[in-house]
Image: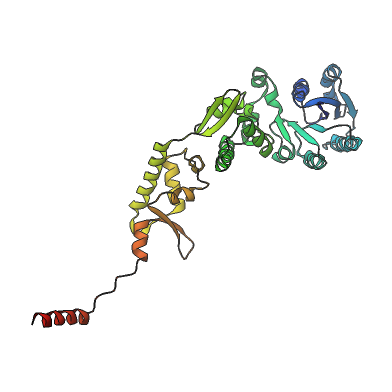
């Protein structure tokens, strides 16, 4: 099978020259780079630092003068070139290197035409552009950790925290994948998890969380077990029956403490999360907290007339709904006594 061919198009106005070597090295994972073009105003004083990088890596510079001060002149030129290359039918995908969200529509358009779109940019890159790409990689991750520590300021680290997907989001996605396969009676392979996470979150990269491999990343997350059989690695939800019992007992105690009045579902959830911050209903096979509550046999959920969702003990709701037993009339009782008396006579 032949390697895929890619066109690498770089926006020099929004990317530092220090990343060039790392960008081209990263692209070797995907295929062969047949186009290497970089767009900018090469008459400016800032363009001087690019000269060495362009010569060493055989990158073609495309000149675009700044016709208006403060405006990015390279965007339109890069977009036109990308569409020209698309219609030559000579590549299988594109790598767009920019931290500018203005290329979001271009990435979407190229994917509509069946192209792979590899996006690369600094951690300030807007989520819209990240989501539009097939895969997106933060350029800071491509540098060695030593270099990164020297060049990334504390302000940029703060921005990174805002753009990187929360680890809890990734954990929930993994739980959903495993649960879905369990329901179908299938095992969940490590490779499947990596592939589906990449499809769902184009900028997912374990290096964002301080790991170099997906297996190590998952191993250190509470709630997952990795099992290795020969060359196959599968991932399972870690069963903790004792924890499940403790959680259910706590929930039932909170409801019981409220008596006949019951407790609102939202307030019950707040109490549980306050006592057990790591609680996640999906780890125990439930899609939502409400389903978890319904899994406790002693509890029921009712919706009141004013649409308030409350949790009650089942024996209390049954008492409220159970009709009163009919009273025996005095007449019947008297009649029986009279008959008995008659028999005795």
Residue at horizontal 84%, vertical 16%?
56
Location of residue 16 (image quadrant): top right
Which of the pair 193/169 is nearer the observer? 193
Residue 241 seen in this snapshot: yes
Q: Is residue 194 left or right of residue 17?
A: left
Rendering coords of residue 337 (x, y %): 15, 79
Q: Is residue 320 left or right of residue 16?
A: left
Residue 210 seen in this snapshot: no
Location of residue 194 (image quadrant): top right
| Vertical side of 318 occupied by 57: above or below | above
Rendering coords of residue 256 (x, y %): 34, 52
Residue at horizontal 23%, vertical 79%?
329
Q: Is residue 122 left or right of residue 213?
A: right
Rendering coords of residue 11 (x, y %): 81, 31
Which of the pair 43/311 is nearer the observer? 311
Q: Is residue 133 left or right of residue 150?
A: right
Is the N terminus in the top left, top right, bottom left or bottom right quadrant?
A: top right
Which of the pair 198/2 is nearer the observer? 2
Location of residue 7 (image quadrant): top right
Is the C terminus in the top left, top right, bottom left or bottom right quadrant?
A: bottom left
Residue at horizontal 47%, vertical 37%?
278
């Amino acid at each position: 099978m032949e390697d895929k061919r890619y066109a690498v198009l770089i926006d020099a106005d929004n990317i530092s020259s220090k990343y060039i070597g790392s960008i081209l090295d990263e692209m070797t994972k995907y295929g062969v780079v047949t186009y290497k073009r970089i767009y900018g105003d090469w008459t400016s004083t800032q363009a001087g630092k690019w000269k060495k990088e362009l010569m060493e890596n055989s990158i073609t510079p495309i000149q675009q003068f700044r016709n208006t001060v403060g405006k990015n002149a390279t965007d339109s030129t890069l977009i036109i070139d990308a569409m020209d290359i698309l219609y030559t039918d000579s590549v299988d995908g594109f790598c767009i290197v920019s931290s500018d969200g203005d290329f979001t529509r271009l990435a979407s358009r190229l994917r509509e035409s069946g192209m792979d779109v590899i996006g690369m940019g600094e951690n300030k890159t807007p989520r819209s552009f990240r989501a539009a790409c097939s895969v997106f990689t933060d350029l800071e991750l491509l540098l060695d950790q030593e270099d990164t520590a020297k060049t990334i300021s504390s302000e940029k680290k703060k921005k990174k925290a805002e753009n990187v997907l929360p680890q809890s989001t990734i954990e929930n996605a993994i739980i959903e994948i495993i649960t879905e396969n369990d329901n179908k009676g299938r095992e969940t392979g490590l490779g499947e998890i990596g592939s589906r996470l990449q499809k769902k979150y184009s900028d997912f990269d374990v290096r964002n969380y301080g790991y170099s491999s997906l297996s190590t990343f998952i191993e250190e997350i509470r709630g997952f077990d990795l099992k290795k059989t020969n060359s196959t690695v599968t991932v399972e939800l870690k069963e903790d029956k004792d924890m499940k019992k403790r959680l259910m007992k706590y929930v039932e105690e909170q409801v019981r403490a409220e008596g006949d009045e019951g407790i609102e579902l939202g307030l019950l959830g707040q109490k549980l999360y306050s006592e057990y911050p790591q609680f996640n209903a999906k780890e125990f096979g439930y899609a939502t907290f409400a389903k978890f509550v319904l899994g406790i046999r002693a509890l029921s959920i009712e919706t009141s007339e004013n649409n308030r969702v409350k949790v009650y003990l089942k024996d209390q709701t049954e008492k409220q709904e159970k009709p009163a037993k009919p009273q025996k009339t005095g007449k019947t009782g008297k009649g029986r006594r009279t008959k008995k008396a008659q028999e005795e006579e």
